[in-house]
Amino acid sequence: MFDLMGMMGKVKEAQAKIKEVQSQLVHLTAEGESGAGMVKVTVNGDRKLIKIDMDESLITKEDKEMLSDLIVAATNKAMEEIDVKIKAKMKSATEGMMPNIPGM
């Protein structure tokens, strides 16, 4: 027989674990780079850009547009990587707590 009370308990337990993991995501970081490593950016689990490193040779008036493109590309790569890390962290936090329900 289906145990609704047991299921509700598991849901509450999962919600608490998810909330705990979400509060820790700010400490999770990912780096993206572009231009063969000439531009590197770091983002955190809150999906905020926290650091930009760039090769000094890029800092010229003539290369302003290229530098902008490299920063955008590196940031997008870092955001993709942090999304993967967040999903993995959330999955490990709730693993085994919920039954295998399609779509959840």
Image: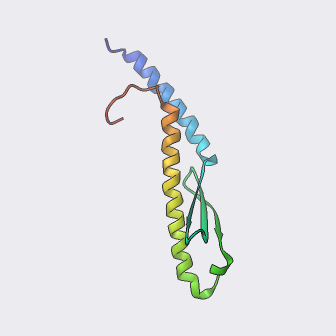
Which residue is painted at 53% across and 40% down in the image?
A: 89
Q: Position of residue 54 (x, y in %)?
A: 64, 72
Q: How many discs mark residues in the rendered view?
A: 0
| Image: 87 above or below 20 | below
Q: Is residue 61 left or right of residue 95?
A: right
Q: Residue at x 61, y 72 (%)?
A: 38
Q: Quadrant of residue 55?
A: bottom right
The one of 24 and 52 positioned closer to us in this rendering: 52
The image's colour scheme reads rainbow
Q: Quadrant of the N terminus?
A: top left
In the shown orientation, is residue 45 left or right of residue 101? right
Q: Where 25 falls versus 99 (above or below)?
A: below
Q: Quadrant of residue 60?
A: bottom right
Q: Which residue is most to the top?
A: 1
Quadrant location of the C terminus in the rendered image: top left
Residue lying furthest right: 56
Who is closer to the viewer here, 98 or 34?
A: 34
Q: Is residue 98 left or right of residue 46?
A: left
Q: Looking at the image, which residue sits at the far front?
A: 36
Residue plotted at (55% across, 41% down): 22
Question: Is 63 above or below relative to 48?
Answer: below
Would you place residue 30 above or below residue 14 in this image?
A: below
Residue located at (48% from left, 30% from top):
95
For residue 26, side relative to residue 89 (left or right): right
Rendered location of residue 71, percent (x, y): 55, 70
